[in-house]
Image (tube, helix red, strand yellow):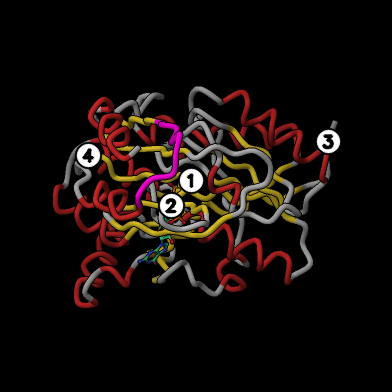
Amino acid sequence: MKIESTEVYLLTGFLGSGKTTLLGRMLDYFVETGKKAAVLMNELGEVNLDGMLLGEEVPMKELLSGCICCTVRGDFGFQLHRLLEEHAPDVVIVESTGAANPMEVLDELSELSLYTGVELKDVIAVADALQLQEAAQKGKGPTYRLMKDQLRCASVIILNKTDLIPSQQLPTIQKLLREWNPAAPAVVTVRCSADLEQLLSGDAVHPEPGSMQEKGGEPRSSHNHVLVYTQELDKPVNSESFEAMFENMPEQVYRAKGIVSFTDTSKRYLFQYAYRQLEFTPITPQGKVKDVAVFIGEHFDKQEIRKRVHELM
Ligand SMILES: Nc1nc2c(ncn2[C@@H]2O[C@H](COP(=O)(O)OP(=O)(O)OP(=O)(O)O)[C@@H](O)[C@H]2O)c(=O)[nH]1
């Protein structure tokens, strides 16, 4: 069965770089331009926290507890197909986990485009200016390679979080991006505030099926180094102790998010810890949702994190 062509945008980028922030902006843009957008979301943890930030009116399917490019590869195609059949969207935005190798996701998408009529319009990579700068200084390691892969196969790069670096360092990062990917325009942003009309009107990109693996040069399970630890929070916790826990977080944990209730406020919050910065957004989750914290990083000691969380309760 051939379904009418649907535009697909793939959002990639390292953990915490701003993909969900960009997703929110893209959804607003598609509402303004009268296009029906749907979202396919992939989270590494067991709960889809980013999904809770989306309005209920946006059709969404999620792939949990895995990464698009390996454990849930088959599920990805299946869920995308379901979205197309159930909602007939004009546009699908795929937000892939920051740990996914986009070459592999592109491979999967190009296979799907053979029989579903999806057309990949853009691979948008969101780069965190500070993380990029530090990774480039190190110049090696699995995180560095993944970052480079994500940026190399993008058709558009959003150089985000530029408020966190001194402006004189920007040209060096831009130069590095041009070296890694001379073809993709790199738009400098804070909170992914880009001119989407200009950004999304470019020509489509056409991945060549089967050719992705050689380009990446990485084995399929190229992100085994990323660990995820999900911990339920049985009780409200003290907000200061909670913040102190993150101030002393081992540097191997570079991303955390979750839902928390505090003993000293009545609201519940979605918390986001990205690259040593902690942010809270008040939320009212639909249905019964437990408080939970998801920690993501490289080779960190899960028992140690578990102990620290237990000390809060
Ligand atoms: N200072 C600063 N913070 C930002 C910027 N853009 C996003 N953030 C914050 O960074 C955190 C992570 O942003 P997200 O949009 O959730 O990042 P993500 O890439 O979807 O994260 P994952 O889904 O974990 O990969 C949130 O707390 C955002 O509010 C920016 O330009 N500057």
* Magenta-tinted stretch: 230-238
Dot 3 falls on a residue whose secondary structure is loop
- CA distance for labels 2 and 4: 19 Å
Dot 1 falls on a residue whose secondary structure is strand
Q: Is residue 240 left or right of residue 8?
A: left
Q: Along the polypeptide, which appears first: circle 1 or circle 2?
A: 1
Q: Nearer the viewer, mark 2 or mark 4?
A: 2
Q: Along the polypeptide, which appears first: circle 3 or circle 2?
A: 3
Q: Which residue is at the front of the view, 185 or 25?
A: 25
Q: Is residue 91 left or right of residue 214?
A: right
Q: Amino acid at mark 2?
A: Phe
Q: Is mark 1 within 8 Å of ligand 1?
A: no
Residue 261 x/y as whole percent: 47, 48
Q: Amino acid at mark 3?
A: Lys
Q: Amino acid at mark 1?
A: Ile
Q: Residues within 10 Å of mark 4 (few under 14, many from 20)?
A: some
- The quarter of the image holding the N terminus is top right
* Residue under pointer 1: 259
* Residue under pointer 3: 2
For residue 98, the mark is: none
Q: Along the polypeptide, which appears first: circle 3 or circle 1?
A: 3
Cβ–Cβ under 8 Å for marks 1 and 2: yes
Rendered position, 313 above or below 78: below
- CA distance for labels 3 and 2: 42 Å
Dot 2 falls on a residue whose secondary structure is strand
> Which residue sits furthest right?
1
* Residue under pointer 4: 252
* Residue under pointer 2: 271
Q: Along the polypeptide, which appears first: circle 2 or circle 4?
A: 4
Dot 4 falls on a residue whose secondary structure is loop
Q: Amino acid at mark 4?
A: Gln
Q: Nearer the viewer, mark 3 or mark 2?
A: 2
